[in-house]
Amino acid sequence: MSQQQPAQEQPTEPKYEIRMADDGMPVASSTFAENIDGVYWTWITIAIPFFLVVVGPMIYFALKYKRKSEDEKTHPLDHHLRLEVFWTFIPTVLVIYLFWVGFKAYADASVAPNGAYEIKVTGQMYNWTFEYPDGTITNELGIPKDKPVKLILSSSDVIHSFFIPEFRAKQDAVPGLYTSLWFQATREGTTAVECAEYCGDGHSRMLTTVEVLPSGPDDQQGTFENWLLNGGVKTPLPPVQLGEKKYNALCMSCHSLDGSRIQGPSFKGVFGRQEKLADGTTITVDENYIRNSILNPQGQIVEGYPPTMPAFGYLKDKDIEGIIAFLKEQK
Ligand code: CUA
């Protein structure tokens, strides 16, 4: 770890923050979030009293009428028509009501409005990539506030699930299939994106962020349009910081910074290190080795590690140079 980085900003523990509301739920940051919370609280409000009404007497009767001995006669109890009609009718009405409440919220959250802004999302063990209509590719999602956004999701390996808790939006990303998800963000700021489908041992680290920016002219700093024009950053970053950002989005789930082994070799002291490769040769980790390992990971595998890293061919030279600069800092 280099000295420039204060302890609270260690890239191994990036902040994927979810803002919390007073009711213990993440704050509602999309147009349909409150609606979905409404369904949740409706169900909870009905389910808890009914649970008590059913399970309470059940336990009481089980104890009270417990058969005392082997020869005790059981009661020849018959049915009670009025009671049975009563306890069939009320639950039926309730279940229909709960279905209606849930289905309405589900339908609203499922159908994207016409003209929504489309972004392509690809899940891959263990990161997300976002492709914008102008060709920009990022690993952190940026979206305009108060505009409907439609995501077209897919996966390049196994099933992942794209989840933004603050938006109450979740959808599977499935290989060989396109799924979609829409939302309209109502609150500026940054919040966590999680993977909600177990996809491998890097699953819990398959995290990124969504930044909600005000919409405005693309020559005005701080707008979504300006962010997109700059390739997905608010202000261009110096190489080490750009590299750290890419590390957090792409490398962190498999390469540690503290020397511990995850999927791939740790990046602690990686630059200039001698590595024994699977083919028996030994190399020194330099700029070219890092670049080749990003673009063609199967080319030179370090001995003892599985050849599972995907290629990151979409990264720009600037990104790769940033990663190299960041790795040089990992002493
Ligand atoms: Cu991707 Cu879990």
Image (spheres, grey):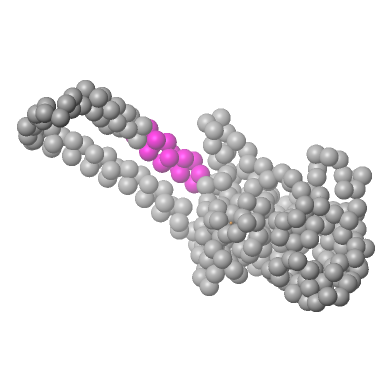
Residue in view at x 53 percent, y 73 percent: 176
Residue 241 visible, this orientation: yes
Is residue 11 left or right of 224 when viewed as pictured?
right
The residue depicted at 74 percent of the width and 66 percent of the height is 305
In the drawing, does residue 32 fall left or right of residue 48?
A: right
Residue depicted at 91% across the width and 68% down the height: 284
User: Quadrant of residue 115 in the image?
Assistant: bottom right
Q: Quadrant of residue 226?
A: bottom right
Location of residue 60 with respect to 36 vertically, above or below: above
Residue at 82% from the left image edge and 64% from the top image edge: 319
Q: In the rendered image, is residue 235 in sight?
A: no
Closest to the observer, 121 or 276: 276
Magenta-highlighted residues: 32-46
Q: Position of residue 228 (x, y in %)?
A: 73, 60
Q: Estimate the x, y position of residue 196 in percent, counting from the top left.
A: 55, 53
Magenta stretch: includes residue 41: yes
Q: Position of residue 294 (x, y in %)?
A: 78, 69
